[in-house]
Every structure is written in structure tokens, then in C-alpha cells.
Amino acid sequence: MFVIGIDVGTTGTKAIVVDEKGNILGKGYKEYSLITLPGGKIEQNADDWYDAAVFATKAALDTFDGDKNEIVALSLSTQGGSTVPVDENFRPLSNAYTWMDRRATREISEAVSEAGGGDVIYKKTGWEPDPSLDIAKFRWMRKHEEELFNKAHMFLTTIEYMNYKLTGKAVTDPGNAAMRQLFDIVSGEWDSFLLNLAGVEKDRLPECRFTGEYIGTLTKDAAEDFSLPETVKVYNGGHDQYCAAVGCGAISDGDMLLSTGTTWVVLGVTSKPIFTESFLAPGVHPCKGVYGNIASLQSAGSALKWLTQTIGEDDFSKLDAEAEKRRDSAKNIYFYPYLAGAGFPHNIRAFNSCVLGMELMNDKYDLARALMEGVAFETRMVLEEFEKFGTKITSLKMVGGAAKSEVWSRITCDICGCEISFPAEADTCCVGAAILAAVGCGIYPDYKTAGDNMIKYRGRLIPDKGVETFYNDKYDKYRQGHFLLRAFFEK
């Protein structure tokens, strides 16, 4: 038997065909564009999501030499927070307002005031009030696009629109529902207080089912589009970060996923949701009984990209090789990687990037080493935020661009002081979606058993005790510098 995992992301869609042992037998990808408009508007054509999923799946099937009739199930990983209004036939009435859209800044301020503070919204949904999410979007739409708002039969995010196109049923999951800021993660229901705040009726939102629940088989049209049998079963998917957690084995209390892209994201698995003053974002994990708590480091991978462009070094293998030699020569350099403001756990947009301790003897590779260390120090701060609330960190699963860098991976391991394992497959969102499908259709009884059989690791790192004192001392000084600089930028 075979299953398909599809990841509908922000800039493109990936698809894989997988066997019961996690061997990837086919892979496909299709990119699409964002539509950027004045006033902070960032939109997307919702039909691009479906068309790209069709293209990517067919591309994956082109290299699959098995029997299509033995493909039994599929599931989705999707971007969260991108919303499209649809008519009675579930056709888009406009572009989707993406999760990056910032047009509703005034509306979210008004909503926070009406709610009696942002904490009310955060404690229900797990997400800090933000202009990109649905409370703000709906208030903006009612004010500026009243005809469109009134005409809309329903408002669907990516997973709901895709589930409808696949099965004829618009179904969401708790992770994506919570990111809409209309759903209470504790009660597991659409929240009447939040719906009133947004000005939208419950019947204009989709049904919420738990991640991994059976939705239905492919419709005739979808089966024809995807070149798959109508017997293929569709199981409810999840938000991409939660699927990535499943796809790398971060499923038990204390497991940590470190996803190192343009933004670094830490997802920590805990037995209870963690609400913090720093707005850690807790949500319902696909594994029952645990929660996934998300923190984002805004300037991480993007900071290194900025540096390589600035210093004119686009050979990452050379950068790695040289940075590896620079621990001692860069020992007094402290790089605060806040090129887009200081993200979690500081959340200070006005706190800009700084470098302390540079001397004439230092060069661009010392600076690169210090930047890598700075991002790792920020990651350690995130892990310590979890530890404040009693989380015992048992492992760190590292994926993404920085996981390909031996020196950055080693720096992160030594600074954070915990073992790191590296999944062999980079597309962990797709693997997670495939595992949801495999468990849903009964190939495996649970996510742990499925992960033990379907997730492969290419290696692991253990902290080097020989540099523990060095990095503990440097981390203490990094934090001292942070608080001094913070006082300057907060004036």
C-alpha cells in the first residue's frame, strides 16, 4: 500500500508518494506567486493552491512505478491564516487574503480595545492579536468590502478550500482553526465571543474535525484531475508546522522541532498549552493529549542571507569551512541578528541588529561565525522560555537550510546543550501529511509506530563538553549586551 502527502505552502506546493516504510517513490513541486498591493495587502489566487497540488502530485506519480490502485490515502499539510471568501458553489469571490497581509492594523487595534485587551484573544486562541488573522480581516472587509463580505457564503482557509476541492467537504483542523483567532483551543469550538468581535456567523465557517480524521474519498472530478482512483481516502490534515513535527518525530512531551528557514521556528511539544508574556503560540498537536507551542525567530536564515549578500560571499561551503575555524578569533564578537526587529521572546520591532566587539583584525568569516552563534543564542533563549514552565527538553529535531550546515548545526548543538537529530528527508511537512494518511487508513495504529517505521534520520550530534564553559560564558555576555542594547532601543 502507498500514501500521498501534500504540502500546500506559501510559495508553492510539494507532493510525495510514500510506501509503508517511508521510502519516497515519487516527488513533485509547483511554485506560485504572491500578489503584493499597496497598503500592506498580500494576496494569493486560491485556485493556484489546487492547481499546484494537481501538478505536483502528477509529477510525483510520473516517477512512481507502482500500481496506482494501491494508493489508498492522502492528507494535507497547509499554510495557515490565509482566507478566501467563496460563494454557494464554493468558488472564490476574490483573492485570498494571506497570513502576511497587514492591511487591517487599525481594525486589530480596535478589536483588542473592544475585547478588553489582547490577552483575552491570546488566551482563547493561542495566537497574539495580529492584523493578518481573521478577526482583523473580517472587520476590515466589513468596513471596506461590505458587498464582498455580505455576498460570501463561507470563508475558507487553505486546508478547508483544499479539502472541499478534494472531497466536497469543507473541513478544518484545530491548528488551522486556532490560527484564524476565532477558535478556542481549550473547548475545541468556534468561540461566540470571538465571532462577535469579528462580526461573522458560525455557519459561515467550516466544520472542525480533529487532525487525522476521515473526511471522504476523492470526488470524481478530483480523481480525474489527480489521475488517481476515486477510492483514495482523504484524511484531515494540519497546519504545516504541526505536520513538520509529526514528520520528524516530535510527538511526545519534551520533543522539540527546530525548523531553520528564512525564519527559524521552534515547536515544543508539551502536555499542557503554555501561555506566556512573550506570546508563545500554543495549539492542539495532531497527537492527542499533547500541545505544540510555536515560537518564531524572525531574523535567522534571512540574517545570514543578508550577510552573504553584503560581504559578497555566495559560496556557502567556503563560508562554512572558514567559519568553522573562527571560534577563537570571533570569541569577542557578539552579533544580535535583529534585522527585522527582535522577535520571540523579545517582540520588539524597534530593536535593530547590532554587532559588538569587532576589531581591525577581524574579517567577514569572523562576522559570519558570530552571526551563527547569535542565532543559536536566540534559540537557547527560546528553549529556556519552555524550561521556565517546567518543560524537560528531551531532544531537538533540526530541519531546513541550517541543518545542511555542519558548522551551524554544531554551534547550535553546543550552545543549546542538547542532542540534535537530523531527519533524512527535508520535506518533513509532506512526510507528516503522509504519516497522517498512513495512520488514518490503518497501516499503522498510531503516530509513534508510523514514525518509527517511516521516518529516517541521517545523523545526530551530541554537545561537546569541551566547549561548554566557553559558550556558557559567551552566552552570559551576549545576554548582558542584549539588555543594555534593549534599554537604548526602547527609549
Image: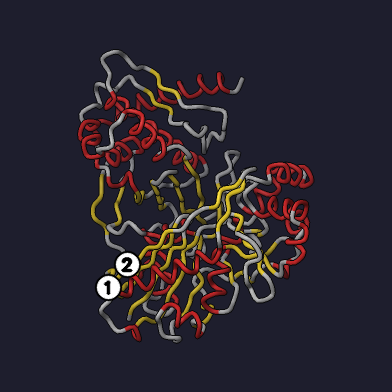
Residue 253: percent from left, percent from top = 45, 55
The image quarter containing residue 363 is top left
Identify the element where label 1 is drawn: loop
What is the crowding at mark 1: few (fewer than 14 residues within 10 Å), some, or many (at least 20)?
few
Looking at the picture, which amino acid does disc 2 mark?
Answer: Lys
Q: Nearer the viewer, residue 150 or 168?
A: 150
Mark 1 or mark 2: whose residue is earlier in sequence: 2
Whether label 1 touches label 2, CB < 8 Å? yes
Total marks shown come to 2
* Residue at disc 2, secondary structure: strand
In the figure, 264 relative to 22: above or below?
above
Residue 440 x, y percent position in the rendering: 45, 76
Outermost residue, top direction?
Answer: 360
Bin the neighbour count of mark 2 within 10 Å (Cα to Cα): few under 14, some 14-19, many 20 and up: many
**Residue type beneath disc 1:** Thr
Residue sitting at 61 percent across and 59 percent down?
A: 95
Report which residue position mark 2 lands on.
27
Residue at 25 percent of width and 27 percent of height: 327
Image quadrant assignment for residue 367: top left
> Which dot marks residue 63?
1
Residue 372 visible, this orientation: no
CA–CA distance in space, label 1 to label 2: 7 Å
